[in-house]
Image (cartoon, grey):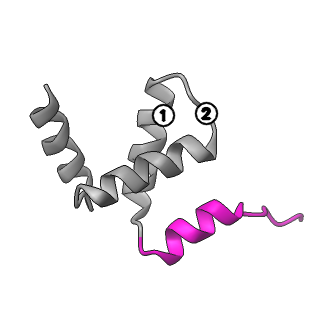
Amino acid sequence: MKQLQVPNKIKAWIENNTSEELIKEALKEATFNGVSNLRYIDKILYEWGKLGVKTVEDVEKNRMKRN
């Protein structure tokens, strides 16, 4: 059985203690915006980090503030 290779970006997110749930939420955000590349997802996670977003609940609160 061939082992799946995890891209370096994803490894970096995990090593920086980004939760799996937050990574999934960033993936959903990117997909919602019609973008499907890791650089865009990385930017979402970076911006959330600058805002202090650490959980999916924080994402929801941030969305409420923007609207």
Q: Secondary structure at mark 1?
A: helix
Q: Amino acid at mark 2?
A: Ser
- Which quadrant is the C terminus positioned in? top left
Of pointers 1 and 2, the one earlier in the residue sequence: 1
Residue 47: x %, y % from top left: 36, 50
> Residue 61: horizontal and vertical position, in percent?
13, 44
Q: Magenta stretch: give its range.
A: 1-17
The residue shown at (46%, 24%) is 33
- Looking at the image, residue 4 lies above or below residue 28: below
Q: Is residue 48 left or right of residue 29?
A: left
Cα–Cα gap, marks 1 and 2: 6 Å
According to the picture, the residue beneath numbered tag 2 turns out to be: 36
Q: Residue at x 51, y 66 (%)?
A: 13
Residue 51 colored magenta?
no
Tag 1 and tag 2, C-beta contact below 8 Å: yes
Amino acid residing under circle 1: Ala
Q: Is residue 7 left or right of residue 33?
A: right
Q: Secondary structure at mark 2?
A: loop
Task: Locate residue 66, reporting x and y percent.
Answer: 16, 31
Left-right relation of 58 to 19: left
Is residue 67 placed above or below 25 in the rendered structure? above
Q: Which residue is mark 1?
A: 30
Q: Residues within 10 Å of mark 2 (few under 14, many from 20)?
A: some
- Categorize mark 1 by other alpha carbons within 10 Å: few (<14), some (14-19), many (20+): some
